[in-house]
Image (tube, rainbow, N blue to C red):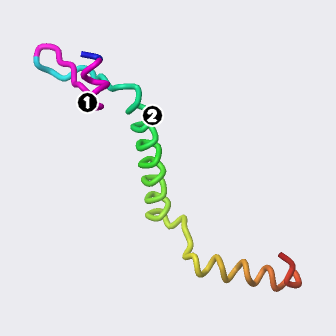
């Protein structure tokens, strides 16, 4: 069973009395799955920020930075 899961790189759903109870995944795929979940979490958090009004348009941010730089005498 383990060799088949590793070879096919497809998760195997383990059942008990016909009900799914666990998933067996090969170790090569596991880090990829974790990375995908982390990216999806970051994407969801970004969408929450947008929905909550916690972001500003890029043009507004650039204009503020340019104004700040101009007030500082053009220093980087």
Q: Which residue is at 50% across, 60% downward? A: 49
In the structure shown, which secondary structural element does the residue marked by tag 1 occupy?
A: helix
Foreground pick, 3 / 61: 3
- Does 57 appear above or below 32? below
Q: Which residue is at 50% across, 67% downward? A: 53
**Which quarter shows the C terminus?**
bottom right
Answer left or right for 71 relative to 14. right
* Horizontal and vertical percent position of residue 28: 40, 30
Q: Are marks 1 and 2 in contact (CB under 8 Å)?
A: no
In the structure shown, which secondary structural element does the residue marked by tag 2 occupy?
A: helix
**Which quarter shows the N terminus?**
top left
List the residue tagged with mark 1.
8
List the residue tagged with mark 2.
31
Magenta stretch: includes residue 2: no
Report the mark closest to the observer, 1 or 2: 1
* Horizontal and vertical percent position of residue 27: 40, 26
Q: Which residue is at 30% across, 22% downward? A: 24
Q: Which residues are magenta?
A: 3-17
* Horizontal and vertical percent position of residue 33: 39, 37
Foreground pick, 11 / 76: 11
Answer left or right for 1 relative to 38. left
The answer to which image quadrant residue 72 occupies is bottom right
Foreground pick, 45 / 10: 10
């Amino acid at each position: 069973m383990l060799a088949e899961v590793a070879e096919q790189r497809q998760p195997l759903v383990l059942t008990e009395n016909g009900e799914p109870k666990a998933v067996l995944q090969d170790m090569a795929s596991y880090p990829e799955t974790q990375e995908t979940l982390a990216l999806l979490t970051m994407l969801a958090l970004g969408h929450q920020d947008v929905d909550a009004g916690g972001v500003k348009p890029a043009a507004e941010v650039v204009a503020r930075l340019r104004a700040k730089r101009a007030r500082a005498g053009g220093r980087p």
